[in-house]
């Protein structure tokens, strides 16, 4: 049977090994992997078509990772919002519970580069303390297993955690964040999904960044999860040289829907040290959103968000569809640029509020 231990033998974690397979001299990558460990699953490596392609860029270390750009190792201030080393409690009713620091591939753009793939494992004690914290906080109704990748744990270990979480009355929903359906789809077995389906309502957010990741193998993995009744979402990261064009993103989003995966978030790249070469400007993301909405199924359109520096949370961004030229008039621009006006109900005099009300939509509010 496929176990994480066995698959380890097939992972590539040294530039010399990678050089052998790819037939290229990669000795210049050794200093990079000394700082940020490398790991690529055999399967994911097999998706590379040529040096520098979108799969390569995500998987193969780059000397640019070592350039000191003055960026933070922890741009989202996760450590400050961690009551325990492996719990991030930023929002009122939900928290991240980090249960593994390993992944089937160590993405070169990872925002948690400071942790992921480093030698330390999350011990039984830390898992126990995390469970105690969650049990002691009745406001936590949504627990997101994260890491690293929770599916790197053996089925039995993962099940023990899920079982304990399910026994906490105030935990309504469980979520797993996992890139494994994309990077190591063979890990998704009928045995795993039969176990997961015992812990519903359980959601899984996976992570695909390029249409070339949509293969018969990843489609089968998502199919098994969906057949187990697990609603699937995708958290894509907008990456320069990988998916920073409307055409690529449209193909990816449509491909995800065919696999029964609902695009959930599209992230602006975080300001993490060692990842600057992946960043696009915010306008690129807005152009992509503009090219998706209206031109394809609404189901295929994720929310474009910036995870605000300093741990301020996810902020949605939209191309300017909505303005308010007068107090009661809302000016709407459709996806093709056609304008219409919506006259809204008069404000209740007692509910008077400032003219520049924030309607929650980019460039909305104020007079234009
Ligand atoms: C993203 C995130 C969540 C989940 O946010 P949702 O918008 O509910 O998906 C929770 N906690 C932290 C720290 C996060 O970064
Ligand atoms: S799978 Fe997620 S946590 Fe793991 S290295 Fe990639 S981005 Fe980071």
Image (tube, helix red, strand yellow):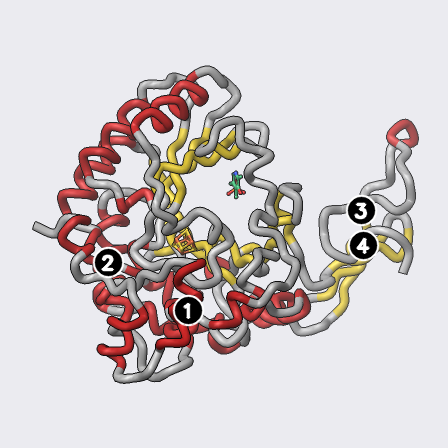
Q: Are marks 3 and 4 in contact (CB under 8 Å)?
A: yes
Q: Are marks 3 and 2 in contact (CB under 8 Å)?
A: no
Q: Earlier in the sequence, mark 4 or mark 2?
A: 2
Q: Residue at x 87, y 48 (%)?
A: 328
Q: Nearer the viewer, mark 2 or mark 1?
A: 1
Q: Residue at x 23, y 33 (%)?
A: 157
Q: Residues within 10 Å of mark 1 (few under 14, many from 20)?
A: many
Question: Element at badge 1?
Answer: loop
Q: Nearer the viewer, mark 4 or mark 2?
A: 2
Per the image, the residue denoted by label 2 is 185
Q: Earlier in the sequence, mark 2 or mark 1?
A: 1
Q: Earlier in the sequence, mark 3 or mark 1?
A: 1
Q: Earlier in the sequence, mark 3 or mark 4?
A: 4
Residue 330 badge: 4
Per the image, the residue denoted by label 3 is 344
Residue 87, above or below 114: above
Asked whether 142 or 180 is in front, the reply is: 180
Residue 61 badge: 1
For this view, does 70 lie left or right of residue 29?
right
């Amino acid at each position: 049977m496929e176990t994480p231990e066995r698959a380890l033998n097939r992972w590539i974690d040294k530039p010399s090994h990678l050089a052998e397979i790819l037939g290229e001299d990669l000795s210049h990558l050794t200093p990079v992997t000394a700082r940020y460990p490398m790991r690529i699953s055999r399967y994911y490596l097999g998706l590379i078509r040529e040096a520098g392609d979108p799969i390569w860029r995500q998987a193969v270390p780059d000397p640019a990772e070592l350039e000191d750009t003055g960026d933070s190792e922890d741009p989202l201030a996760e450590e400050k919002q961690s009551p325990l080393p492996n719990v991030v409690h930023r929002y009122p009713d939900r928290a991240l519970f980090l249960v593994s620091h390993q992944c089937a591939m160590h993405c070169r753009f990872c925002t948690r580069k400071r942790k992921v793939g480093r030698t330390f494992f999350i011990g039984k004690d830390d898992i126990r303390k995390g469970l105690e914290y969650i049990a002691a906080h009745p406001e936590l109704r949504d627990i997101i297993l994260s890491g690293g990748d929770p599916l790197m744990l053996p089925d039995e270990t993962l099940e023990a955690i899920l079982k304990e979480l399910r026994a906490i009355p105030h935990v309504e929903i469980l979520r797993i964040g996992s890139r494994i359906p994309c990077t190591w789809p063979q890990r998704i077995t009928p045995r795993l999904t039969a176990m997961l389906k015992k812990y519903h309502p359980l959601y899984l957010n996976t992570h695909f960044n390029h249409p070339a990741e949509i293969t018969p193998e990843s489609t089968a993995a998502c199919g098994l999860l969906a057949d187990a009744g697990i609603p699937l979402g995708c958290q894509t990261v907008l990456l320069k040289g990988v998916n920073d064009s409307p055409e690529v993103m449209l193909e990816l989003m449509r491909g995800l829907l065919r696999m029964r995966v609902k695009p959930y978030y599209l992230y602006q790249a975080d300001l993490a040290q060692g990842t600057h070469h992946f960043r696009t400007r915010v306008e690129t993301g807005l152009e992509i959103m503009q090219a998706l909405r209206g031109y394809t199924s609404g189901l295929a359109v994720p929310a474009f968000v910036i995870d605000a520096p300093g741990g301020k949370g996810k902020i949605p961004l939209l191309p300017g569809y909505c303005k308010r030229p007068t107090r009661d008039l809302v000016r709407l621009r459709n996806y093709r640029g056609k304008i219409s006006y919506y006259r809204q109900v008069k404000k209740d005099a007692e509910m008077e509020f400032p003219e520049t009300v924030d309607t929650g939509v980019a460039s909305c509010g104020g007079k234009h």
